[in-house]
Image (cartoon, rainbow, N blue to C red):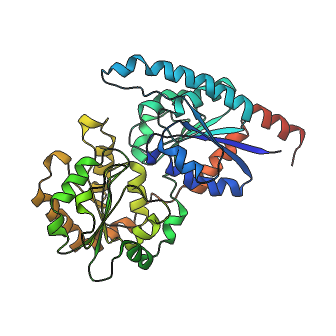
């Protein structure tokens, strides 16, 4: 019997990269994979580059604050629900896997109406609004952190950790240095601003760039449209909007990392044992999930946490120098982590969920192994 899976999730790279990490393992298990995402989200390019059939639907954001768009977006969600129902009827997947983001809501709701089992993944300490809406429709909910289990139905929650792209473990430091035009004369600082919310991190790093370049070579992943033209050509400093294939080599080249505290990004940093400084999105710009993520990593001894509103040039520069000096201590702590690669765990959950599909269950009953 043909095995078919629909994946969904989007809006930010963090809602897409775990799906990308799972795709090779699922394909190896014989799954025909389709992806449902938004029209303009980052997921469309990332998934399209992999040759996976991509189906865009209407997507509206469900905001917790007053905004004129709140009057329009519910209609986008309703339209997306109709589109998702039609697509699932055509594709007829055995199971749906959702990484979250608001584009996933109509897909999961449509799957429920078709009696298609769903597996969700929640990266952060507490479920986001999109996943909160979807959890009642899910068969299982995967989590990154033990603390998250208390926020989920006990019969659905499974501690898996975050899927890590296997190619990240295959990076080549020398290739990374060559890609940036660097050499081995100075250690490398990698700055990951993220696809959203990168402005404050970018500004903080650029404010102390002259001092940093006295000790480090700096790779700056600054986000779409955020390359600073006047800083191009400075020796020891390179900027990129977004890096895909070469990221593994840049990570291999990095001695320390500055990053936002999105759960998937920090789990990749942890898996690669990179000493790091986390600057979470402030509570007024988010629901506070990055703050909780960063606090957890700080308390475990994996990271230094700096709150955005407290950053000064002196504080950031001191943190960079301290993390580099104490890098062996952070690496030692990260090696003891129990948040291991979760790909095999999640693939098993998807396989088990597939058996709950009435169509698959009937086939297995009529064709016992």
The location of residue 306, given as percent across then percent down, is 20, 53
Q: Residue furthest bottom?
A: 185
Residue 109 visible within the image: yes
Q: Position of residue 353 (x, y in %)?
A: 67, 40
Q: Is residue 223 left or right of residue 54?
A: left
Q: Residue 136's quadrant in the figure?
A: top right
| Total residue callouts | 0
The residue under the point 12% across, 58% down is 313
Foreground pick, 148 / 218: 218
119 sits left or right of 174 in the view: right
Residue 68, placed above or below residue 265: above
Residue 160 appears in view: no
Q: Residue at x 66, y 23 (%)?
A: 113
Residue 84 position, x and y percent, is: 62, 28
The single residue placed furthest to the top in the displayed view is 71
* Image spot of residue 131 (x, y percent): 48, 33
Give the residue displayed 83% in from the left and 34% down from the top. 362
- In this orientation, which residue lies closer to the viewer: 304 or 55? 55
Q: Relative to 52, say whether 340 is above or below.
A: below
Q: Residue at x 40, y 49 (%)?
A: 263
């Amino acid at each position: 019997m043909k095995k078919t899976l629909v994946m969904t999730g989007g809006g930010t790279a963090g809602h897409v990269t775990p799906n990308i990490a799972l795709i090779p393992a699922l394909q190896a298990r014989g799954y025909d994979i389709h992806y449902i995402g938004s029209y303009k989200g980052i997921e469309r390019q990332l998934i399209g580059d992999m040759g996976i059939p991509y189906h865009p639907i209407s997507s509206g954001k469900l905001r917790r604050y007053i905004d004129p768009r709140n009057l329009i977006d519910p209609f986008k969600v309703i339209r997306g629900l109709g589109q998702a129902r039609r697509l699932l009827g055509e594709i007829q997947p055995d199971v749906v896997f959702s990484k979250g983001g608001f584009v996933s809501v109509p897909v999961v709701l449509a799957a429920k109406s078709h009696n298609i089992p769903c597996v969700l993944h929640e990266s952060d300490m507490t479920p986001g609004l999109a996943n909160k809406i979807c959890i009642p429709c899910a068969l299982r909910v995967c989590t990154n952190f033990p603390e998250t289990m208390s926020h989920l139905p006990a019969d659905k929650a499974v501690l898996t950790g975050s899927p890590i792209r296997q190619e990240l473990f295959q990076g080549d430091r020398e290739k990374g240095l060559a890609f940036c035009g660097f050499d081995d004369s100075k250690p490398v600082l990698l700055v990951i601003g993220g696809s959203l919310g990168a402005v404050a991190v970018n500004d903080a790093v650029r404010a102390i760039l002259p001092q940093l370049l006295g000790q480090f070579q700096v790779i700056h992943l600054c986000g779409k449209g955020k390359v600073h033209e006047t800083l191009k050509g400075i020796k020891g400093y390179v900027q990129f909007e977004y890096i895909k294939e070469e990221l593994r080599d840049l990570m291999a080249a990095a001695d320390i990392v500055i990053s936002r505290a999105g759960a998937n990004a920090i789990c990749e940093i942890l898996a690669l044992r990179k000493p790091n400084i986390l600057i979470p999105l402030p509570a007024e710009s988010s629901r506070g999930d990055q703050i909780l993520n960063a606090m957890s990593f700080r308390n475990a001894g994996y990271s230094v946490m700096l709150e955005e509103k407290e950053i000064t040039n002196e504080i950031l520069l001191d943190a960079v120098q301290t993390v580099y000096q104490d890098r062996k201590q952070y690496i030692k702590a990260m090696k003891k982590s129990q948040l291991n690669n979760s790909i095999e765990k999640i693939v098993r959950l998807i396989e088990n969920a597939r058996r709950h599909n009435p169509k698959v269950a009937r086939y297995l009953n009529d064709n016992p192994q």
